[in-house]
Image (tube, rainbow, N blue to C red):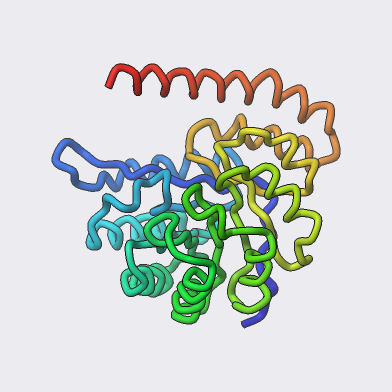
């Protein structure tokens, strides 16, 4: 496989799983979310990751979601699909299914979202990645962050040919990101996460793509595109006057909901 992978320059939102009162997938809502993301300037669209609550989705619903997403995107943007499961066998199945149904990339965190030694994790990635012929995004998560050191992430890239991206957002992610960006190989793209927090710091470090939830894509994208176009002052102004207030409101709203429950 050639490592001539797409280099993303903007937002890569992960869609939520839209269901009705009976727990059935609402496919029309997937289409509406796709159109919103494309209009907001997204550079890729993903599903079946953490923001999608992938661990709660039945196998047949996963396939319906992928088919619907690929159909509705209709080649306008790359589609990436989370393949992680609670065991290696199911992760391999999810990855192969995503590729067969038209996904352009898969994203893979450790099963179940943060377990295993570094050697076990390496074997896991080796097994799943060898089952597909499309690029793979490695996702560092909170539970796995101790093993996902910059050196380990670069080892994955160096030794597994279809790994082309890393989303670093586990424990102490900003410090890890700083260390990773000092030594990252040219062909490995680091993608920002953490809901867009510290976006300006990540941009200064050289991060050019960000993976968040679907909400407020136009706000996130305005900051990224201003910075990438060379207007750092505009990016900082937009970040301080639009994105930070939004993130503060989003965080405080979620905190109130948690307290009520």
Quarter of the view holding residue 96 = bottom left
Q: Is residue 11 visible?
A: no
Q: Is residue 242 left or right of residue 52?
A: right
Q: Say whether residue 128 is left or right of residue 65.
A: right
Which residue is drawn at the image coordinates 63% and 23% (left, top)? 244
Tag count: 0
The N terminus lies in quadrant: bottom right
In the displayed structure, would residue 227 be above or below residue 140? above
Q: Nearer the viewer, residue 227 or 94?
A: 94
* Residue found 44% across the figure and 59% down from its top: 81
Q: Dividing the picture into quarters, in which one does residue 175 lie?
A: top right
Q: Position of residue 36 (x, y in %)?
A: 48, 38
Residue 212 location, x and y as percent?
A: 53, 41
Q: Is residue 197 left or right of residue 47?
A: right
Residue at figure coordinates x 57%, y 38% from the top left: 40
**Residue at left offset 70%, top offset 50%:** 9
Q: Is residue 87 above or below residue 150?
A: below
Give the percent coordinates (x, y) of residue 100.
39, 74
Q: Quadrant of the C terminus?
A: top left
Q: Position of residue 195 (x, y in %)?
A: 55, 37
Q: Is residue 93 above or below residue 226?
A: below
Q: Quadrant of residue 39?
A: top right
Q: Is residue 90 visible?
A: yes
Q: What is the residue that sits farthest to the left in this orientation?
A: 22
């Amino acid at each position: 496989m050639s490592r001539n992978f797409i280099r993303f320059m903007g937002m890569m939102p992960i869609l939520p799983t839209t269901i009705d009162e009976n727990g059935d997938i609402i496919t029309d809502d997937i289409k509406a979310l796709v159109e919103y993301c494309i209009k907001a300037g997204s550079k890729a669209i993903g599903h079946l990751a953490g923001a999608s609550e992938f661990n709660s989705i039945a196998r047949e619903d996963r396939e319906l979601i992928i088919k619907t997403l690929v159909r509705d995107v209709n080649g306008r943007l790359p589609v990436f699909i989370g393949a992680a499961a609670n065991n290696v066998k199911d992760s391999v199945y999810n990855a192969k299914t995503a590729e067969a149904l038209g996904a352009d990339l898969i994203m893979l965190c450790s099963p179940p979202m943060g377990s295993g030694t570094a050697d076990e994790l390496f074997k896991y990635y080796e097994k799943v990645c060898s089952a597909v012929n499309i690029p793979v995004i490695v996702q560092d998560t909170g539970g796995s962050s101790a093993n996902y050191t910059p050196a380990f992430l670069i080892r994955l890239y160096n030794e597994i040919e279809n790994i082309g991206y890393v989303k670093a957002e586990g424990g102490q992610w900003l410090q890890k990101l700083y260390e990773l960006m000092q030594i990252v190989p040219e062909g490995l793209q680091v993608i920002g996460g953490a809901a867009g927090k510290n976006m300006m710091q990540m941009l200064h470090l050289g991060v050019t793509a960000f993976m968040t939830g679907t909400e407020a894509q136009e706000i996130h994208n305005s900051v990224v595109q201003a910075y990438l176009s060379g207007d750092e002052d505009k990016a900082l102004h937009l970040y301080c006057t639009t994105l930070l207030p939004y993130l503060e409101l989003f965080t405080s709203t979620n905190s109130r909901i948690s307290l009520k429950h």
